[in-house]
Image (cartoon, rainbow, N blue to C red):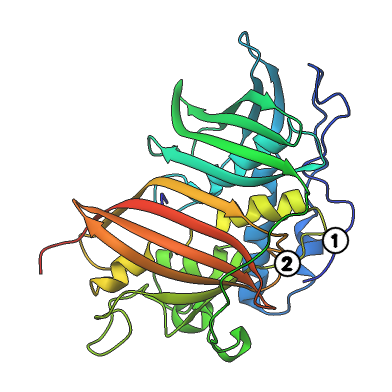
Amino acid sequence: MSDHRTVTGTHLFATPPCWRTRCPLRRAPRPPSLRRVAGHLDDEDGAARAEGLAGLLHVLDLTPSGVDASGQDLFTGENQRSPHGRVFGGQVLGQSVVAATRTVEPARRVHSMHGYFLRPGDPGTPITFAVERLRDGGSFSARRVHAIQHGQPILSMIASFQEDQDGVDHAAPAPQVPAPEDLPSIADLVGRLDHPFARYWARERPVDVRHVGGPIYLPTAPGQPGESGDGSQAVWLRVAGPLGDDQALHRAVLAWASDVTVLEPVLRRHGAAWATPGIRVASLDHALWWHRPVRADEWMLFVQETPSASGARGLGLARVYDRAGTLVATVAQEGMTRLPPR
């Protein structure tokens, strides 16, 4: 990690009809107001998360910036507030998916992306997204996106898009875990701590996150989950308000969310927590496959594991299920993971 129902009229990914030719890209309407999003939530913590969701929708609403000399489509994006001093990697992933989607025929949906984090993002500087149209075939389209700050790429990503097609179908089943309503939220666990990181994670993040077996934001006590074992975990997650029915938006938000907990199994395997003094974790690369339609404003179950860690790098894997147990996505990320000596 580098650092609820329907709202109508939200089309963040409207694509102009002249997608196969060079034409001015229309700016999509602004996201719904904070008042409309927060109206679905009654408590103080929910209202704070709704404000975070409004901020997320705002940064995903990229500004078209024309075409550069090499023919790449350009977009500009702002950054979410972060207490970490660097841009959250999931934000750049989601924005890159938005930028690529804006240049593809609407009937084609993103089904995979593979990206490398090259430099930390500066939260005080807007990000330029340069999209190269690699190919538009009979059923698939491919796009390369460079996210650029200060004249240098901070992320390089390739995404593939496909029209809906019939074919073979199978999926790994979802495990049996407690329902999210039966689990405490992060706000319940750490939201009242007088610490900026606790307040940010519990109240300002635009998502409701609920760990099966307990989170690892604070160092674990002996015998608690994360102290030993294989590091696997299950996490329920959904955004804090409605997103409408635009599948392109839900897939971009899933890209954002896929970077929230994917490396936690590495820490859990070695008894570490995000608050462990001296810990250093940074995303190196990220892959995401969207298998089936997804709704990021409904509960998603992230079933996560770590098959390997070596050379100060840890690998996190996740299968993402919807509430009905349908496998909707798979995530893989390798991250630099440096833990203090015991």
- At label 2, counting other C-alpha atoms closer than 10 Å, the crowd grade (few under 14, some 14-19, many 20 or more) is many
Q: Is residue 27 above or below residue 176?
A: above
Asked whether the beta carbons under mark 2 and mark 1 sit within 8 Å of each other, the answer is yes
The answer to which image quadrant residue 239 occupies is: bottom right
The answer to which image quadrant residue 103 occupies is: top right
At label 2, the amino acid type is: Gly
Residue pictured at 39% horizontal, 69% vertical = 305
Residue at the extreme left: 342
Distance between mark 2 and mark 1 Cα atoms: 9 Å
Q: Secondary structure at mark 1?
A: loop
Q: Position of residue 80 (x, y in %)?
A: 56, 48
Residue pictured at 52% horizontal, 66% vertical = 319
For residue 297, side relative to residue 24 (left or right): left
From this viewpoint, is residue 46 visible? yes
Q: Secondary structure at mark 2?
A: loop
Q: Position of residue 104 (x, y in %)?
A: 75, 33
Q: Mark on residue 7? A: 1
Residue 136 versus residue 99: which sits nearer the camera?
A: 136
From this viewpoint, is residue 121 visible? no
For residue 229, side relative to residue 114 (left or right): left
> If the image is split into quadrants, where does the C terminus sit?
bottom left
At label 1, the amino acid type is: Val
Q: Which residue is mark 2?
A: 241
Q: Position of residue 234 (x, y in %)?
A: 48, 77
Residue pictured at 85% horizontal, 61% vertical = 7
- At label 1, counting other C-alpha atoms closer than 10 Å, the crowd grade (few under 14, some 14-19, many 20 or more) is some
Q: Position of residue 197 (x, y in %)?
A: 41, 64
For residue 157, side relative to residue 230 (left or right): right
> If the image is split into quadrants, where does the N terminus sit?
bottom left
